[in-house]
Image (cartoon, grey):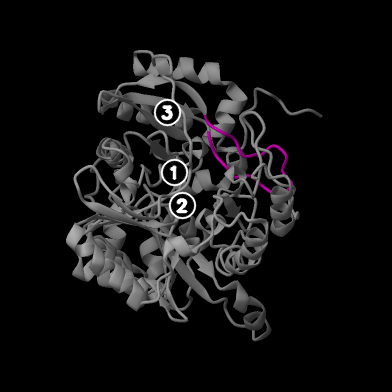
């Protein structure tokens, strides 16, 4: 018997969790106080994502603990929002100290220009969150069914327009941050609102969005944020030394579910142009359309890309223009020539210097004589500068005076930090997600395996005379694509709007060899 098309679809379980959570409060406070377990109940584990933290366990230890009939090795990953990827020296020092004090000693730079701390135990979770807040950064909406960290270009030495794109990212970040006071109540010990006082989420409503939402701003000619992979993108159009406005892109996203053919990666569509002072309104209305029309019955089909794929780009443009009360203009011409970061020293528009540092897999640690984490902490303590996390998991040390360049170089040399010029073009253009042992979705290795694979591939490249060629390689541990493999030259391919990924199970090494064999490089 075919389903009744007029019968409302049954909502996913997460919708009832949000509905009953009292604006993301749930029973998080009670769960944190329960010291009989290192975990929290499943419903609260869904809600804590909105607060920026995921419950995880060390999968390397599961089998052994199961044999001993012990609880899994639970811990929490905390994601810290850094709008546009820009943070101060004091903020870097504070987060670095927390990674040693409460986490596993590593500092993860993500593909969305955010920090991640791994291995935080439940008993330390609240204190860690409080101390993050003391740095004037926060974790609210770093995860969950809301707008995530807003990205912007991280290479200011390439364009004097960087400040304008960063300003837009900050404005959108502020405007789309959830209004609930549950975050401050649970983690900062602020008083709960009085009984009877009205609670509102003016943009999100009581059940927030059907799934996560991602936004990025890009400045041609460098697409270092992979803007077409976002739910909503803004591409700055320069005119007479300023950003005249932004082309609006909608419907990108890379996640898919293994074995579910109705899920797929998708590139965003360019739908129009808006002025800089209209961009925040555009962002709000696009989010609201997804709030009202996104699929709340199937979370694997709940991103904006599926709403647009199902209802059509023309429908979406009409709906957006109606809600705006004015119409987007026709898109302006633009082009990108690279998605990579810039490495080494470059002078910015103000005569200051910026250093692009490669960070393998975005994971900063002190290991076997290469003490990159210590080196950057020393720079933060001793050099007047600013830090910019890139969407390719790397780091830009910006606003350095000419006199301090030598000091930075000396610190790197003393700590055995690899100079970007000594690394292959393939390695410098590599990305990997965290995957095993902590990600619950991982089906294979990624971050731990990619460096050794790169060693093998570097030998192949050297033999072919291709060591200097910039080839994008993206590694991920599951089809969700956090390492953006579907946009890499090695890792996936694209066809029309939807991106056709490499068949699951096809080895990354085989894909690399095939790509090199068919390369058009001389």
Q: Nearer the viewer, mark 1 or mark 3?
A: 1
Q: Nearer the viewer, mark 2 or mark 3?
A: 2
* Residue at numbered disc 3: 286
In the depicted structure, whether residue 211 falls above or below residue 284: below
* Residue at numbered disc 2: 392
Question: Which of the two residues, 422 or 259, is positioned nearer the viewer here?
Answer: 422
- Quick one: label 2 or label 1, which is nearer the N terminus? 1
Give the crowd class for mark 3: few <14, some 14-19, many >=20 residues within 10 Å: many
Task: Determine the residue positioned at 61% across, 68% down.
Answer: 455
Q: Residue 95 sits in which quadrant?
A: bottom left
In the depicted structure, whether residue 146 falls above or below residue 106: above
Horizontal arrangement in the rendering, residue 437 relative to residue 78 (left or right): right
Magenta-tinted stretch: 252-268
Quarter in which the N terminus is drawn: top right
Give coordinates of residue 476: x percent, y percent. Answer: 60, 56
* Residue at numbered disc 1: 224
Task: Determine the residue positioned at 26% across, 72% down.
Answer: 378
Give coordinates of residue 21: x percent, y percent. Answer: 42, 50
Disc 1 to disc 3, C-alpha distance:
23 Å
Give coordinates of residue 401: x percent, y percent. Answer: 19, 57
């Amino acid at each position: 018997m075919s389903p009744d098309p007029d019968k409302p679809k049954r909502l996913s379980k997460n919708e009832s969790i949000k509905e009953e959570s009292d604006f993301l409060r749930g029973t998080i406070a009670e769960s944190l106080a329960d010291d009989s377990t290192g975990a929290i109940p499943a419903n609260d584990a869904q809600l804590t994502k909105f607060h920026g933290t995921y419950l995880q366990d060390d999968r390397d230890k599961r089998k052994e603990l199961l044999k001993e009939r012990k609880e899994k090795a639970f811990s929490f990953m905390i994601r810290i929002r850094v709008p546009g990827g820009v943070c101060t020296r004091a903020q870097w020092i504070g987060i670095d100290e927390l990674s040693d004090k409460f986490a596993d000693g590593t500092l993860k730079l993500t593909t969305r220009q955010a920090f991640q701390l791994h291995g935080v135990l439940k008993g330390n979770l609240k204190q860690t969150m409080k101390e993050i807040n003391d740095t004037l950064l926060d974790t609210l909406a770093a995860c969950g069914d809301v707008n995530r960290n807003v990205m912007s270009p991280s290479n200011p030495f390439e364009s004097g327009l960087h400040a304008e794109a960063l300003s837009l990212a900050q404005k959108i970040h502020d405007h789309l941050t959830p209004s609930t006071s549950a975050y401050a109540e649970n983690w900062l010990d602020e008083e709960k609102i009085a009984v009877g006082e009205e609670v509102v989420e003016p943009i999100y409503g009581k059940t927030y969005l059907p799934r996560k939402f991602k936004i990025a701003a890009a400045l041609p000619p460098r697409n270092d944020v992979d803007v077409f992979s976002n739910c909503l993108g803004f591409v700055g159009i320069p005119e007479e030394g300023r950003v005249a406005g932004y082309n609006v892109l909608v419907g990108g996203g890379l996640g898919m579910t293994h074995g579910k053919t109705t899920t797929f990666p998708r590139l965003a569509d360019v739908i129009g142009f808006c002025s800089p002072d209209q961009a925040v309104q555009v962002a709000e209305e696009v989010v609201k359309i997804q709030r009202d029309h996104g699929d709340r019955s199937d979370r694997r089909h709940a991103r904006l890309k599926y709403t647009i794929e199902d209802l059509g780009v023309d429908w979406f443009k009409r709906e957006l223009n109606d809600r705006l009360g004015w119409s987007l203009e026709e898109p302006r011409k633009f082009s990108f020539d690279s998605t990579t970061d810039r490495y080494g020293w470059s002078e910015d528009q103000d005569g200051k210097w910026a250093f692009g540092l490669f960070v393998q897999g975005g994971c900063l640690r002190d290991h076997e004589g290469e003490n990159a984490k210590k080196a950057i902490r020393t720079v933060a303590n001793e050099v007047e500068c600013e830090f910019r996390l890139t969407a390719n998991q790397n780091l830009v040390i910006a606003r350095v005076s000419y006199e301090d360049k030598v000091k930075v170089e000396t610190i790197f040399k003393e700590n055995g930090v690899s100079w970007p010029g000594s690394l292959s073009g393939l390695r410098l253009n590599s990305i990997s997600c965290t995957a095993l042992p902590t990600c619950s979705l991982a089906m294979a290795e990624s971050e731990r395996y990619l460096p050794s694979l790169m060693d093998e591939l570097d030998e192949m490249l050297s033999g072919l005379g291709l060591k200097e060629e910039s080839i994008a390689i993206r590694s991920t541990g599951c089809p969700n694509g956090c390492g953006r493999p579907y946009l890499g030259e090695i890792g996936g391919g694209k066809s029309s709007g939807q991106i056709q990924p490499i068949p699951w199970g096809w080895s990354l090494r085989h894909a690399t060899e095939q790509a090199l064999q068919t390369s058009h490089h001389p």
